[in-house]
Amino acid sequence: MTPDIVEDAPHPDHILDVLSVTKYYPVEGGARIKAVDDVTFNIAPGETLGVVGESGSGKTTLSRIVARLIDQDDGRIIFDGTDISYLSGPAFSQMPKRRMLQMVFQDPLASLNPRFRAAQAIANPVLRLGTPEERRNVAALVEEAAAHAGLPARFLNSFPYQLSGGQRARVDIARAIVLKPKLIILDEPTSALDASLQAHVVQTLLKLREELGVALMFVSHDLNLVRLISDRLLVMHLGKIVEQGSAQAVFNDPQHDYTKKLISAIPKLGRRRGDSGMSRQFTAAPVDD
Ligand SMILES: Nc1ncnc2c1ncn2[C@@H]1O[C@H](COP(=O)(O)OP(=O)(O)O)[C@@H](O)[C@H]1O
Ligand SMILES: [Mg+2]
């Protein structure tokens, strides 16, 4: 399928189409850099797309453009069949579809309001974007989302500073899933966690995807982590997509030198040819991390 066709009629099988998106930032001396450079990709419903690349490759900029937190300079974003390219964040917030796209940020301590208990943080999207019926049932929805995210109910009364990093990540995930969105963008959601907690959060995400059928755009500099969760991988370098394909193909048979470099930077222990990763490596997620 060509992007031209998508422009006229968004692909019915895609939850997201990103078409030739470019973003510049001004730099000193009046020059500008292309943080995102002519990027085109799509995500199917229920699919997990891993976006990987070194720090500075444009991953966060791209994520924030898709979530309408910042505007692109060029290109289009079609979410669930609706062109949201020209909607700023506040205009997007007014749309009924807004609830179908949620974002999980890199640092839950920064993204969670310190004065909100976990239950209030998770309830917030329901109170802002939910239907009257959902607002009436907010307590039950919060408990359900917390359970899905692996956060025991006894932590719902805690403030962020009273929670561990893993528990905060789960609050952030519960908040993102409480309205049962169709797409969640996760920008380095585990980078503040140590390796074993990262594995548990990834395990939780794999389970969620199964239970809720939600599509994920999982952004990380860590190729080894991303491949565990992704159906497809997209490799970014200096704002451009240099390679994309199935997670297995990209990892086992990388075509681009930059991808090869990323793979060779992974410690040998975690690298077994023919192993597409997957949750088998992990034991059940503990609930008290
Ligand atoms: N607000 C900003 N102003 C100017 N330059 C920025 C800004 N945000 C990011 N950049 C630059 O854009 C490029 C991409 O950054 P970013 O999207 O944060 O990449 P990543 O998330 O892959 O680390 C980098 O060169 C970064 O320095
Ligand atoms: Mg980033």
Image (cartoon, helix red, strand yellow):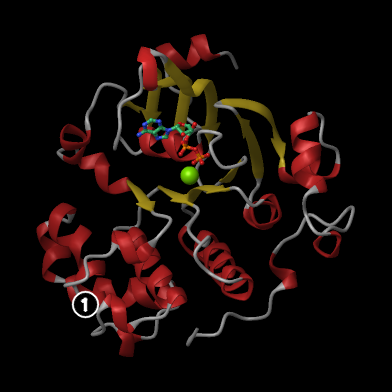
Mark 1, residues whose alpha carbon is within 10 Å: few (<14), some, or many (≥20)?
Answer: many
Q: Is residue 42 above or below residue 136?
A: above
Q: Is residue 25 above or below residue 214?
A: above
Left or right: 169, with 235 as reference point? left
Left or right: 189, with 87 as reference point? right
In the image, residue 101 lies at what x, y percent?
A: 34, 45
Judged from this view, the residue extending furthest toward the right is 273
State which quadrant residue 147 falls in.
bottom left
Q: Secondary structure at mark 1?
A: loop
State which quadrant residue 118 falls in.
bottom left
Residue at image point 40% right, 64% down? 173
Q: Is residue 106 above or below residue 156?
A: above
Judged from this view, the residue extending furthest toward the front is 29
Residue at image point 71% right, 55% down? 224
Judged from this view, the residue extending furthest toward the bottom is 154
In the image, residue 40 lies at what x, y percent?
A: 53, 23
State which quadrant residue 241 falls in.
top right
Q: Read off the residue under disc 1.
A: 117
In the image, residue 83 lies at what x, y percent?
A: 32, 23
| Pick the front one: 77 or 182 | 77
Q: Image quadrant of ligand 1?
A: top left
Residue at image point 44% right, 74% down? 165
In the image, residue 132 lies at what x, y percent?
A: 9, 59
| Pick the front one: 71 or 42 | 71
Left or right: 262, with 122 as reference point? right
Is residue 26 visible in the rendered image? The answer is no
Is residue 51 visible in the rendered image? The answer is yes
- Could you tell me the amino acid type at mark 1? Arg
Q: Is residue 179 above or below residue 146?
A: above
